[in-house]
Image (tube, helix red, strand yellow):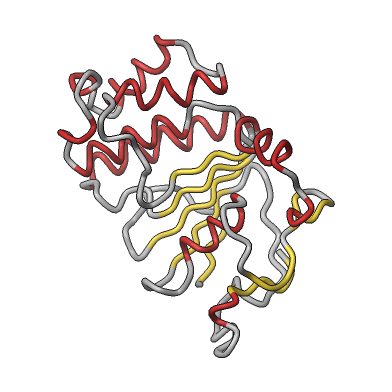
Amino acid sequence: MHEVLPKVFAARGADGSEIWCRDVVLERDRKYLVSAHSGTGKSSLCSYLYGYRNDYSGRIVFGITDIATFGIGQWCDLRCRHLAYLPQEMRLFPELTAMENVELKNRLTGYRSHGDIGQMFERLGIAEKAGEQVSRLSIGQQQRVAIIRALCQPFDFILLDEPVSHLDESNNRLAAALVAEEAAKQGAGIIATSVGNDVMLTIDKEYKL
């Protein structure tokens, strides 16, 4: 990222941020924590990196290519094969079951077997909820479903926007271990945001937003 700043922050500038208006390099096989108070742009940062929003100044470069030049086909390829994302609001389909939400993503990528997915449900303690409609699950259970869904693809980086905000310490540890294990298998980088919840990851670098 080169001198990136949300346009809405243009009047106030970087305001002491270690991300905004800086040159920041994020590398594979490393774990990053971006910590900040609410309203300082954590979700905006993830949306910029994932290509959902472009209301920023500066440049974001993947490899040697400015993402502003990417077309729909390039973004589809990136999101299926190189860039996983767990948004803060989860974006699950409430009328579908937990398993259907995950399988919907997996059909796009073809990355996981049904057995693999079942094992992840088991590890996160929600195997008995796989057939339940998402609308009937607790927020913490929904968050675990969304984490499993995010892992149903190959990736070079995974973006986690407040990934454990609704989990207790025990489930936090289980989820963090699963994400870290999968990232290690793929040699991938982890970029997680937090407002103070301990994401239970061994962090290589922390940035204050």
Residue 107: percent from the left, percent from the top? Answer: 50, 18
* Residue drawn at x 55%, y 27% as measured from the top left: 153
Question: 143 or 204, which lies in front?
Answer: 143
Can you give x and y, in whole percent of width and height, for residue 175 in the image? 35, 37
Q: Against 156, is 126 above or below?
A: above
Residue 70, percent from left and from top: 75, 48
Q: Quadrant of residue 135?
A: top left
Q: Position of residue 62 (x, y in %)?
A: 75, 50
Left or right of 178, for residue 54: right
The residue at 23%/32% (across/down) is: 134
Give the mark count.
0
* Vertical order, 185 against 46 (above or below): above
Please give the name of the residue rendered at 39% of the width and 30% of the height, measured from the top-left corner.
Answer: 148
Q: Quadrant of residue 28?
A: top right
Instruction: Out of 57 and 19, give the one closest to the viewer.
Output: 57
Q: Is residue 107 above or below residue 1?
A: above
Q: Residue at x 43, y 48 (%)?
A: 87
